Amino acid sequence: MSTNGKNVIDLENVSKVYGHGESAVHAVDRVSLKLDPGKLFILMGPSGSGKTTLLMLMGCLLKPSSGSVHLFDHEISSMSEQELPAVRLERIGFVFQGFNLFPALTAEENVEATLNLKGYRGEDARRRARDLLDRVDMGKRLTHLPEDLSGGEKQRVALARALAGDPPILLADEPTGMLDSKTGRKIVEILHDLAHREKRLVFMVSHDTRILHLADKTFYMDDGRLNSEHP
Ligand SMILES: Nc1ncnc2c1ncn2[C@@H]1O[C@H](COP(=O)(O)OP(=O)(O)OP(=O)(O)O)[C@@H](O)[C@H]1O
Ligand SMILES: [Mg+2]
């Protein structure tokens, strides 16, 4: 990982407007932030305040309406739609709000499918999938389908899948949202380790104020505007 201790995500005056005219929604409104690796960032804010939109802008799933997004040395807003998937694949792991696991694939196959996208094949992909699931303590549920897993277990599979390909940036949208506090805490501890021990940049959305002490920095979003506060 070539993180070099500098900002790996740099947003300057970024806005995202959905729709036009009367029905336009200013989901993200002139947000600037710089994030460096080896830290866990937590973003809070009410429903509809723009958190998922901000995560999608940082993860190159959306282009900003205005402003600039830098990931490492890439300027995202000037890149073509054809170039973006490669940046995403190499640099970013995503844990989506509500898991997004493939329902017809087992835990192991869900992780393998992402490894396949990243160029791992056959036995190599299978071995890596098992290693990743072991890391999130899911080695005993490899052949379970998502419907046969608990919420916390599904969340851990989603996390293992996000770690496929060893991304330096991990973006997690409410990874503890549907979990009891003990299971949720376990997930956050894994995310904290991924930041501090493995020097990844981990940025997560959460509503749980009990985990804020684990954050290196907390951000609050309200109506598209971002405020930061040091814990
Ligand atoms: N594709 C879209 N088209 C139009 N409006 C959208 C679209 N996606 C989101 N919005 C609007 O943008 C605003 C921000 O949405 P976003 O999903 O970023 O909020 P959020 O903070 O993640 O909310 P939650 O906590 O409920 O997940 C909301 O008002 C939402 O209705
Ligand atoms: Mg959201």
Image (cartoon, helix red, strand yellow):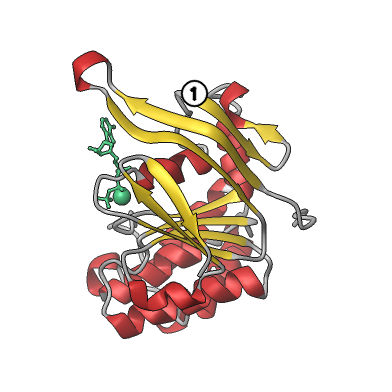
Q: Is residue 182 above or below residue 165?
A: below
Indicate the amino acid at tag 1.
Ser
Q: Residue at x 70, y 43 (%)?
A: 72
Q: Quadrant of ligand 1?
A: top left
In x, y percent, where is residue 93? 53, 54
Residue at 33% from the left image edge and 59% from the top image edge: 99
Q: Is mark 1 within 8 Å of ligand 1?
A: no
Q: Position of residue 189 (x, y in %)?
A: 49, 79
Give percent across and percent down for residue 131.
58, 74
Whether 186 is drawn above or below 14: the answer is: below
Closer-to-camera residue (194/13): 13
22 left or right, relative to 169: left
Counting the numbered discs, the total is: 1
For label 1, the crowd category at 10 Å Cα-Cα, with few meaning under 14, some 14 to 19 and many 20 or more, is some
> Camera-side residue: 19 or 121?
19
Q: In this picture, is 192 found above or below 169?
A: below
Q: Residue at x 24, y 51 (%)?
A: 47
- The x and y percentages for residue 79 are 61, 24
Q: Secondary structure at mark 1?
A: strand
User: What residue is pinned by disc 1?
Assistant: 66
Question: Residue 141 vs residue 22: left or right?
Answer: right
Is residue 111 visible in the rendered image? The answer is: yes
Question: Which residue is pictured at 61% across the width and 28% down the height?
Answer: 83
Q: Can I make out residue 131 in this image?
A: no
Which residue occupies the foreground of this view, 145 or 53? 53
User: Residue lying farthest left?
Assistant: 22
Q: Quadrant of the N terminus?
A: bottom right
